[in-house]
Amino acid sequence: MTHSIDVPKILVVDDDESSLKATEYQLIGKGIRPRTAMSVDDAEMLIAQEKPEIIICDWSMPDRDGLDFVKLLRANSDTASIYFIMLTGRGGTEDKITALTQGVDDYLEKPVKIAELQARILVAKRIIKLQQQLVHHQKMQTYAEMAAAVSHEINNPLTGLLGYLELVKKKIQRENLVESNVDRILQMIDRSYEQGKRIGEIVKKLTSLKDYRVKTYNDGIQMVDIDANNSAASES
């Protein structure tokens, strides 16, 4: 079955098989076919394979419980954004506060009513969509900033190259070229060549850049740190 934002990937975790099956069948009845796990260990393996967008998890489980699980997810950048719905028989306010402050996104008391669970999943889908839009916006902003920084990085040697070529052109266009003029033209060609080599080196470093960093100077101009890879290597 193909999953998308309209049919999210859901993982249900519960050590009670009857409760797990009940939640699974309720979701299937609503057109959602979740993956299931009866322990945090099993859930971890499925996360690596399935990359769920929403996890519905029981609080009370042997070994590692729902709180242990959500803390584990939040501590990992690859899983930190997974929407986590806690299921529990605990109905106290303090329990809800504990769960929410530990990283749980939503909280449902057992026995779970499918209409309420479906409503919470709709909320989760809206939040996931907003997160995706935010990530996209941040990427576009990063690309724009990098493009501006790269233009500053290349602008100086490019300006020098064009300037020297313009001088060479004017020298050659003169009618009476003497030896001193020829020597001067050769010097400017050499400088143009050096500026071209510098641009080539910058482009080479930019294409191999793995860690994007920007240097900001006192005048507010930002330039890409093209030696970021070397800096990172020397620090390690």
Image (cartoon, helix red, strand yellow):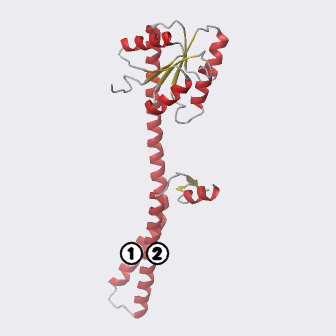
Amino acid type assigned to the residue bearing label 2 in the image:
Glu
Q: Which residue is at the far bottom? A: 179
Q: Is residue 53 left or right of residue 110?
A: left
Image vertical order of residue 128 relative to residue 189, above or below: above
Residue that appears at 35% across and 16% down: 31
Mark 1 in CB contact with mark 2 (< 8 angstroms): no
**Image location (x, y in percent) of residue 196:** 43, 71
User: Which image quarter is the N terminus in?
Assistant: top left
Which of the numbered marks, if any, corresponds to residue 85? none
Which of the numbered marks, if any, corresponds to residue 194? 2
Residue that appears at 59% across and 16% down: 59
Which of the numbered marks, if any, corresponds to residue 166? 1
Image vertical order of residue 182 relative to residue 106, above or below: below
Amino acid type assigned to the residue bearing label 1 in the image:
Glu
Estimate the spatial distance between the alpha carbons at disc 1 and disc 2, rounded to whole Å: 15 Å
Q: Is residue 158 left or right of residue 79?
A: left
Mark 2 residue element: helix
